[in-house]
Amino acid sequence: MTATNLSIELQLRQAKDDNAAHLERLQVARREFTAELDKLHAATQLAEERFQAADTRALLEIDRERTAVVKLQKEVDSVRASAHQTAERHRSEPTALQAQLGDRRQKAGMLEGVLQAVTASRDLVSNEIKAAQAHN
C-alpha cells in the first residue's frame, strides 16, 4: 500500500467515524425532539381538556343565567299585571263608590220622606188624641 492509499483509507475511516458520530447525534436529537414533542402533545391535550371544562362551566353558567332571567321576567310580568289590576281597581272604585253614594243618598232621601210622612201622621194622630181627650 502506498502512502496515498493509506491517506485515502485514513480519510475514509475518518469520514465513516464522523458519519457515525453525526448519526449518533442525529439519533440523540431525534429522541430529544420526540420527547419534547410528546411533552408538548401532553400539554396541548391537558390545555384542551381544561378548555373543554371551562367551556362546559361557562355554558352551564350561561344556562343558569338564562333561567334566572326567565324567572325574573315572569316575576316582573306578574308584578306588572298585578299593578295593572290594582290600578284598574283603583280607577273603577271611585266610580262604584260614587254610584253607591248616589244610591244611598236617594235611599236616605226616600227615608226622610217616609220619616216626614210618619212624623206628620204621628202629629196628626197626636192632635186627634188631644182633641178627643179635650172632648171627653
Image (tube, rainbow, N blue to C red):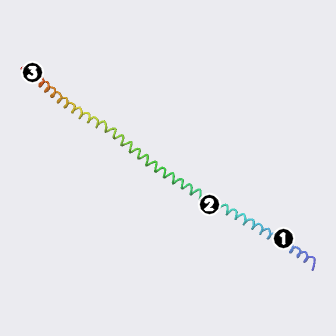
Residue furthest bottom in the image: 1
| Residue underneath mark 1 | 18
Q: Secondary structure at mark 3?
A: helix
Q: Secondary structure at mark 1?
A: helix
Give the side of residue 109 with respect to residue 46, left or right. left
Residue at the spot 43% in from the left edge and 47% down from the top edge: 75
> Percent x, y for residue 34?
72, 66
Amino acid under disc 2: Glu
Give the foreground label among 1 and 3: 3
Position of residue 125 relative to residue 43, above or below, is above
Position of residue 89 relative to residue 120, above or below, is below
Q: Secondary structure at mark 2?
A: helix
Q: Quadrant of residue 56?
A: bottom right
Among numbered discs 1 and 3, the one appearing first in the sequence: 1
Location of the N terminus by quadrant is bottom right
Among numbered discs 3 and 2, the one appearing first in the sequence: 2
Residue at the spot 76% in from the left edge and 66% down from the top edge: 29
Depth check: 107 or 42 in front? 107
> Percent x, y for residue 108?
22, 31
> Percent x, y for residue 90?
34, 38
Depth check: 29 or 55 in front? 55
Tell me whether circle 3 and circle 2 mark residues in contact (CB < 8 Å). Answer: no
Residue furthest left in the image: 135
| Residue underneath mark 2 | 49
Residue at the spot 82% in from the left edge and 70% down from the top edge: 21
Q: Quadrant of residue 97?
A: top left
| Residue underneath mark 3 | 133
- Please count the marks in the image: 3
